[in-house]
Image (cartoon, helix red, strand yellow):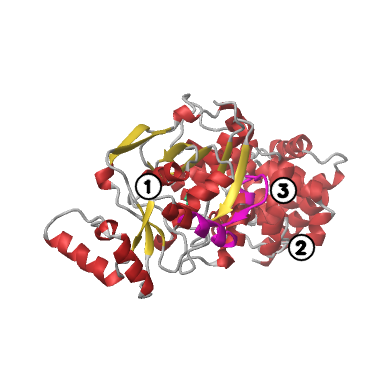
Amino acid sequence: MSEKTVRVRLAPSPSGYLHVGTARMAIANYLFARHNKGKFLIRIEDTDTARSDASLIEPILAAIKWLGLDWDEEIVYQSKRIDHYNQFAVKLLEGGHGYRCFCTPERLAEDREKARAAKGPMRYNRRCLGLSQDEIDKKLAAGEQFAIRLRIPEGATSFDDIVSGRLNRSNEEIEDFIVARSDGRATYNLAVVIDDHDMGITHVIRGNDHITNTFKQVHIYDALGFDLPVFGHLPMILRPDKKKVSKRLGDKDVGEYRKEGILPEAIFNYLCLLGWSPKTDREIYSVEELIEIFNPDNFNPSNAVFDQEKLIAFNKAHIMLKPDHDLAVELAPMLVEAGLTTKYWLETRWEYLRAVVGVLKGRVSRVSEFVDHGGYFFDFDYKYDPEAAAKQFTKEAGPLLTELADRFEQLEEFTHDSTEAVLSQVAAERELKKAKLIHPTRLAVSGMKVGPGLYDILAVLGKTRVVERLRKAVEYIEKQ
Ligand code: GLU
């Protein structure tokens, strides 16, 4: 790595939400910056007024924050820099790197039509490159509108790419592209080069769908006398149908994953490994570990398919790694939203929530499943699973549950071991298999036929709740 402090950027366009493709780019840039003790910057590319939607900027930034990607310095907004870009278009013209193009859109469309019919190259035919000063002056005097095109020299263009090595393209394939439109506004490619230069970007890491832009941008760097940054074009993330992820195809906002119970560290880990390899068999890493081991040589140059199932498996692994307290923080608003409890109730029962999380965490793949699997810890009006009730809440079960309730009530210490001892003792005295007691007890205290270990549930619920629930189940049985 060079001596210069690494400076990279994410440059989202607010024309859609932050989907996994952009999130993946954000993560690669973030890791690159943090691994190299450099800076990670954000630029909002909001000059395309037809496609940009300012109301998407906040959700994009919120998703970046949620992923844990803290950025450095002030965010740069392209829309605030338009006049600045426009000066450079004039500079290119005056410096002889650009020329005026008076061709109207209709004329250009006709040219393209002819080229298509003749199966010739579709690039601009340089009609205006040959205009004499006299002709130009006349057109200007007549008030004809013009765009500014960059003149691409003969030869070939190449640059080094972190992911794919050296990339070359014949200049025949790079047309004299427009750097300023007829209304004087700089085009996207010009704005990006000026920004990357002004922001001191050392490494431009973006999607490989920008390679064609990079070949053009290299000529702008040359014409303006700017040093080239290092480029890295990452492969795309594809949907399972092999199409590029996009909002248009219904791919979701990364922020949606939070609602679906996915942890940001799981998405971070999964997206990082989608196209980058730690070169070991291990897959589950914390963000800190990824920052430590990140190495840009290990990018995979081929496009990768986003696999939702795999993301869920990563999520399950990260749920196990996450401290119970932190999971409780994620879970609390979901419980409130599901109407199972209130913020105030939870505020004074933080220990309880943490204990619930500890008991259930091995059984869930999404944070939201704590709600699905553990509602009974909060909602005391749960219904008994009807099939299980028909099977377990028999006439014989009633007295057994009463006996358990009575004995549990006597316990001084209400723990996993003490409740297990009581249940075993009752089973032994009555010469019953323990299952005969375990199943109805589980149903009585949770309403469910399956779940975590029964004694764990009992210990978390505590004596008062357990006894109350057992007696309630007895009443239910007696009414049948
Ligand atoms: N705004 C571009 C995009 O969203 C990013 C271009 C770049 O990174 O240079 O694809």
Between the residue at mark 3 and the residue at mark 2, the CA separation in whole angstroms equals 14 Å
In this figure, which residue is indicated by the disc labeled 2? 342
Of the two numbered discs 1 and 2 on the same chain, state the one appearing first in sequence: 1
48 left or right, relative to 355 = left
Label total for image: 3
417 left or right, relative to 26 = right
Mark nearest the camera among 1 and 2 is 1
Say which amino acid is labelled 1.
Lys
Ligand 1 within 8 Å of disc 3? The answer is: no
Closer to us: 430 or 232: 232
Q: Position of residue 366 (x, y in %)?
A: 57, 49
Is residue 398 shown to the viewer in this render? no
Range drawn in magenta: 65-89
Say which amino acid is labelled 2.
Thr
Between the residue at mark 3 and the residue at mark 1, the CA separation in whole angstroms equals 50 Å
In this figure, which residue is indicated by the disc labeled 3? 328
Q: Position of residue 152 (x, y in %)?
A: 32, 47
